[in-house]
Image: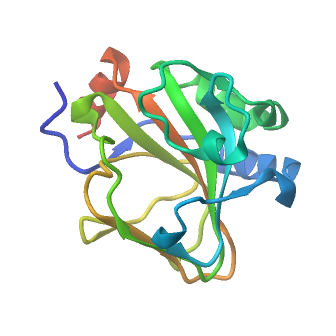
Amino acid sequence: MTSALPDRIRLPLDFDAGALAADLAAFGEQDWTRHFVRDNYEGAWAALPLRAAVGETHPTRMIGVLLFEHEFADTQLLDRAPAIRAALGRFRCPLKSARLMRLGAGARIREHVDPELDAGEGRARLHVPLTTNLDVTFLLAGTRIEMTPGSTWYLRLTEPHAVSNDGAGDRVHLVIDAVVDDWLGGMLRAAA
């Protein structure tokens, strides 16, 4: 199906980066949850759940990756972000979780792997940068990926990856876990 895909693919889905970034103003510090795998990073790394497992209310579990849950729903936080809601609506595949992931200035995510996030296994992690800077380094399998705001990327995160933000501002991505159906699989193959 999609097993021969490269570890990174820029998809032909582009969004208005300014509108996506403007949605961030709707969220206060109290809306963000510190990432729970504290051994994987240093500095400030937080997430904000926009879609979560149905019935989940604990903030840490709402930002977690619950790959084997079958039912996901929009959170109330998504109601504050019309541009992000519209962007999610353009994905014509089943969406599991969707989170904003914020890496603060000077923070680092240590090299790690995320098991079972491989399109060949039917689950894809997609990144849409909202804010970034030239001093953000995202390494996947030892090679840098430069992602511009508003672009959409598939990343096979079963490969080792690490991120550092050596810039002066936060780096925020919309991170989507999606089911690889015919629509997404076809787009991945066509863009590869």
156 vs 169: above or below: above
Residue at (87, 47) in percent of width and height: 26
**Observer-nearest residue: 148 or 2?**
2
Tell me, yes or no, if residue 1 can be seen here. Answer: yes
On-image quarter of the N terminus:
top left
In the picture provided, is 90 more to the left or to the right than 124? Answer: right
131 vs 58: above or below: below
**Observer-nearest residue: 168 or 107?**
107
Q: Position of residue 67 (x, y in %)?
A: 43, 33
Q: Position of residue 181 (x, y in %)?
A: 34, 18
**Observer-nearest residue: 166 or 148?**
166
Q: Position of residue 15 (x, y in %)?
A: 60, 40
Q: Position of residue 3 (x, y in %)?
A: 15, 35
Q: Quadrant of residue 192?
A: top left
Residue at (60, 66) in percent of width and height: 132
Residue at (45, 20) in percent of width and height: 93
In the image, farthest residue toward the left? 4
In the image, farthest residue toward the front? 58
In the picture provided, is 21 more to the left or to the right than 181? Answer: right
Residue at (73, 52) in percent of width and height: 21
